[in-house]
Image (spheres, rainbow, N blue to C red):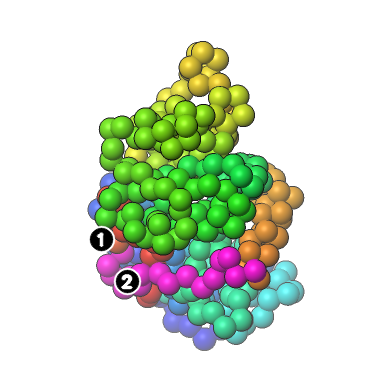
Amino acid sequence: MDTSATMRALRQESLDGPDGLRLIEDAPVPDPGPDEILIRIVAAGVNFVDISQSRGLAANGSRPPYIAGIEGAGEIVAVGANVADLRPGAHVVGASIAGGAFAEYLALPAAAAMPVPPGWTDAQALGMAVSWPTAVAALRQLGRIEPGQTVLIHAAAGATGQTAVRIAKHDGATVIGVASPDKHDVVRALGADHVVDARSDDMIAEILGLTAGAGVDLVLESVGGRSLAASLAVARPVTGRVVVFGLPGGEASITNWDLVYRHQVQVIGLNIGILIQRAPQIFGEVMGDLFALVAAGVLGPSAPAVHSLADGPRVLADLEGRRTVGRLALVP
């Protein structure tokens, strides 16, 4: 391995969110463990889980100080002693829940590495490790979407939301996207049948109106805060499912009284890291579906907005403030 001993990286030094990120020039280059690979980062994905970790909200998340970023793509430069099926020079994309991707090098569990598809750049493969499997699992393995059903997708202009819109339409669903007005054209262009203003005080009435009062069959709830109450209110009674996998809008509570007397719906929690760890068979199904969607052309190379590593704090602040559209990437 021909690398320097130190590298540039974004270090999370406090639980103050993006304000706690600092660019450092002398972070030690990690040594890969026996079951790990070391990759030279070409592009790192920016995800909402990075925000959650930066504020101490992610379960079992890293505590400051730590090198931030969970998703990275790049070239393998070294492999651990137990790694037999990956070789230096190959390009992979993967996620490390422990962090470390906002840097020049990342030690990544070999089991978490996926080959960058032929003809794709490393940056174009970002999403395959986090947002794409999240969308697949939320719609299919957990959400059990079927042709002819109606799905409501919050944050539909975001990276996971855009992926979910594409898959839901491919699966024959009627799609209602939720986004701020300046992002409605983006969501419509993806194929959404209807788009609702995320800031509307009449969101519940509007969505129920679009379903003739019946409610939606599936809600992809990735916002939290007051959005959760709206999601529960518009889900079809008894058979409606609400898959919850994000909370950038803040925590929200639901009681057993709510589920018995107000919202008789099925609430399902999704954390893709826990799914990988605790239900590997289901995750295998998710990845099988994902690669089939890629082969079918439903999912293709992403076109992330690319920013320098030094701009990372601003990029994450914009993501947290919902001022971004689609996938975001940082390059060392």
- Cα separation between marks 1 and 2: 10 Å
- Whether residue 226 is in magenta: the answer is no
Above or below: residue 319 compared with residue 103? above
Question: Residue 299, image x and y in percent?
Answer: 56, 66
User: At label 2, which amino acid type do we have?
Assistant: His
Secondary structure beneath label 2 = strand
227 lies left or right of 299: left
Asked whether the viewer can see residue 246, the reply is: no
Q: Determine the residue positioned at 35% across, 48% down.
A: 179
Q: What residue did someone put label 1 on?
A: 314
Q: Is 303 colored magenta in this rendering?
A: yes
Q: Quadrant of residue 315?
A: bottom left
Vertical order, 259 against 189 (above or below):
above
Reading the image, the residue beneath label 2 is 307
Tell me the amino acid under the disc marked 1. Answer: Arg
Q: Quadrant of the C terminus?
A: bottom left
Q: Residue at x 62, y 53 (%)?
A: 171
Tag 2 or tag 1, which sits nearer the N-term?
2
Residue 102 appears in which quarter of the rendering? bottom left
Point out the stretch of residues depicted in magenta.
296-312
Viewer-closest of 136 and 109: 136
